[in-house]
Amino acid sequence: MTQSATPETKHLYIETVGCQMNVLDSEMVVAALRKQGYALTQDPACADAVLFNTCSVREHAEEKAYNNVLRLKQLKLAKPELVIGVMGCMAQKDQQKVFERVPFVDLVVGPGQLHRIPELIEGARQGERHQLAVSLSRREGSAEEIKRSHETFDPLRDPQMRPTPFQAYLRIQIGCDKFCTYCIVPMTRGPEQGRSPDQILQEAKILAQQGAKEITLLGQTVNSYKWVDGDRTTRLADLLQMIHPIEGLERIKFVTNYPKDMTGELLQTVRDLPKCMPYLHVPAQSGSDVILKRMKRGYTTADYYAMMDRIGEILPGAAVSSDFIVGFCGETQEQFQETVEMVKRCRFKNSFIFQYSVRPGTKGAELLQDDIPEEVKHQRNLDLLEVQNQISLQDNLRFLGKTVPILVEGPSKWSVRKGQTGEFRQMTGRTPCDRIVVWDGNMRQTGEILPVEITDAYAFTMLGRVQTHEVVSGVSQVAEPEVLSLGSLTTNRR
Ligand code: SAH
Ligand code: SF4
Ligand code: F3S
């Protein structure tokens, strides 16, 4: 969205990849830069500052980020005053290496130092080169100093940067201490720290006042959230209780869950609070005990199946989704087959499937051999996806003829691709259990919760028809349990 500009208005182009944490970080950086007189542009050629918010979770994401930055070389030569910055997890991981690979980058800023971006951009405009602002590494200081260096500045928000103005992310936890052997996140995001319940509640209220109907609480292991104040401990279930009464708020979700911390108490809280959506993202990563141990995930397949049973008992019909890594070090065909069995048995709504990518700096890179050939990883990815897609399709088909309450997000991806304009467009939204539905609708429906009858279903999407133009906000969620008890299915979070 290019905005009307006064002569002094400066323009910012920002590109974001990675997880919801990065989406939220970009929102905050944009909010901070707007205060400095920046407006957004969708064209780097019109920008005074270009920022790349990067992800390090797989090598492929990093290579793409470097290529995207390198593509700006001509532009920077033609316009040397253009400030180019690399922020996010790759900035934290590669630090000076970013300047070595792309010498025309002006700033490299880790996710814990984003509050410095306005000042650093100003510095670059004054001619300073190669400014580096990163958090301390895991061994570079006292525990307290390291934590402080990873703190973010969440209260500054920009509603216009949200996925939609009606949906907002709210970070409740920074960093991760689980150290799964494949994963770079504990290095890029630093130690696990909860934010204070007061701050979280205050921010949730502001978001609701700004029009957010759906809030998604964010943390790498969001259900491990813990805040200790004297003899009082606040956990995720308590936070849900605290934010549930907020007026205007209609849907509460939380991602990403850690299997071991999916307690009965949390599930009961989700069951008892109508605004908590019956959708849980709980990555299993593998269906083999040998591999789970090698990944240092801290649970066995028996633990995971017991958790699924618990979910089934307390929240019957809730949709569960997962992540899997295929081709992890030493994974045999039999062990991969155990993952296939897990997907069949758990019938996930959807699964995000990734081919293992060695991350320098992790225990996996140091101690284990990445010995599964790329073509085998690729084949396992395809095979597992096919099994998952079958399940997703079967479960979606069960919604045919049912009417579900949909929070309308806006025009569908198809509509945007086709360049549809005007009032009437193909619209998209989600069911309480996070399934995507599209229908021929109109832009005025955006942000409403509407009853939509499902008329057709595919593995990733369902098609529907709005039953009435009457808005059912507030009472809408009651229709769902009946539908949910029919089974589970899909989305694309990343
Ligand atoms: N905190 C979340 C996941 C963060 S990373 C959790 O614990 O579930 C998102 C997903 O990327 C992970 O669930 C995992 O499936 C995948 N992933 C992480 N590191 C990876 C690597 N080195 N190679 C391939 N996939 C990886
Ligand atoms: Fe990475 Fe494991 Fe932490 Fe998730 S729990 S962010 S996979 S180290
Ligand atoms: Fe990527 Fe960092 Fe998120 S590595 S997945 S952007 S926490």
Image (cartoon, rainbow, N blue to C red):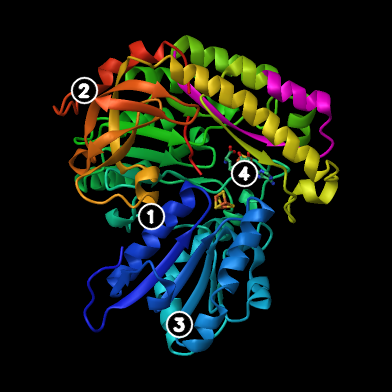
- Residue toward you, 129 or 231: 129
Which numbered disc flags the more N-terminal residue, 4 or 3?
3
* Tags 1 and 2 touching, CB below 8 Å: no
Let me know if residue 233 appears in the view. Answer: no
Residue 74 in picture, x, y percent from top left: 54, 82
**Amino acid type, mark 4:** Asp
Which numbered disc flags the more N-terminal residue, 4 or 2?
4
Which label number is shown at residue 154?
1
Report crowding for label 3: few under 14, some 14 to 19, many 20 or more residues within 10 A (C-alpha): many
* Tags 1 and 4 touching, CB below 8 Å: no
Which label number is shown at residue 177?
4
Q: Secondary structure at mark 4?
A: loop
User: What is the CA distance from the residue labelled 1 to the residue labelled 2?
Assistant: 39 Å
Q: Is residue 367 left or right of residue 147?
A: right
- Residue toward you, 243 or 478: 478
User: What is the CA distance from the residue labelled 3 to the residue labelled 2?
Assistant: 51 Å
**Is disc 4's CB within 8 Å of ligand 2?**
yes
- Residue toward you, 368 or 450: 450
User: What is the CA distance from the residue labelled 4 to the residue labelled 3?
Assistant: 38 Å
Residue 255 in picture, x, y percent from top left: 47, 36
Q: Residue at x 53, y 28 (%)?
A: 350
**Amino acid type, mark 1:** Asp
Residue 295 in picture, x, y percent from top left: 74, 36
Which numbered disc flags the more N-terminal residue, 1 or 4?
1
Foreground mark, 1 or 2, reads 2
* Tags 3 and 2 touching, CB below 8 Å: no
**Amino acid type, mark 3:** Leu
Residue 155 vertical position relative to residue 374 in the rendered view, above or below: below
**Which residue range is magenta in the image?**
317-341
